[in-house]
Amino acid sequence: MKEYVIEKQLSCGKMTVRMRRIGTDCHVILEGGERPHIGCAVLAVPRPSLSGGEQISSTASVLNVTGHKDEFLCRRLAEQVAAGQGRLTVCVGGFHTDHITKEQIREVTEAADQAAAELSEMDWSSLR
């Protein structure tokens, strides 16, 4: 199975985002920080945008591990990839750094958004 891997070294640890193809669907894995883990699972389903037009959006369902805030990142990845690729997408994972600062949270969020944009626009056939 091929996967597409994005790695970003951040001030609060490394972030790794992987995307694999499962049939016609996407499986995204987010891990990083001092203690990578599974803190959340998000299923995003592509659909026509509610604002009309030809734009594709997505609807997400979330399962969180109690006390974890990984939905913030996993949901962004799953929804953007589902809308961009037009495919059912699951994102699981977590990013943890003790005593993370607001600036580092912003850095992690920007890195996740960049990864989501890259995955949304990549050539799907490269995952065969």
Image (spheres, rainbow, N blue to C red):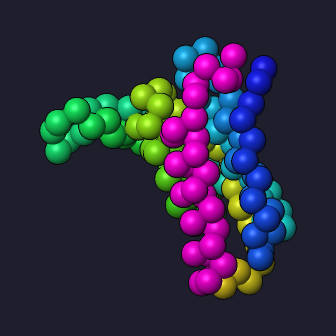
Residue in the picture at 69% in, 29% down: 20
Q: Is residue 34 visible?
A: yes
Q: Nearer the viewer, residue 60 or 106?
A: 106
In this rendering, the count of numbered labels is 0
Residue in the picture at 62% in, 83% down: 103
Q: Pick the quarter of the image with the C terminus.
A: top right
Residue in the picture at 63% in, 73% down: 107
Q: Measured from the top left, where is residue 22 in percent x and y?
A: 64, 20
In the displayed structure, 86 sits above or below 23; it is below
In the displayed structure, 31 sits above or below 100; it is above
Q: Measured from the top left, where is residue 70 in percent x and y?
A: 61, 59
Q: Pick the quarter of the image with the N terminus.
A: top right
Q: Nearer the viewer, residue 52 or 38?
A: 52
In the displayed structure, 3 sits above or below 52; it is above
Q: Is residue 69 visible?
A: no
Q: Is residue 60 magenta?
A: no
Q: Which range is magenta?
A: 102-128
Residue placed farthest to the right in the image? Answer: 34
From the viewer's perspective, is 36 left or right of 65?
Answer: right
Residue placed farthest to the left in the image? Answer: 52
Q: Measured from the top left, where is residue 72 in percent x and y?
A: 53, 61
Quarter of the figure with residue 12: bottom right
Quarter of the figure with residue 73: bottom right
Q: Main secondary structure of the magenta part?
A: helix
Residue in the picture at 79% in, 65% down: 9
Q: Is residue 125 magenta?
A: yes
In the displayed structure, 37 sits above or below 18; it is below
From the viewer's perspective, is 46 left or right of 32?
Answer: left
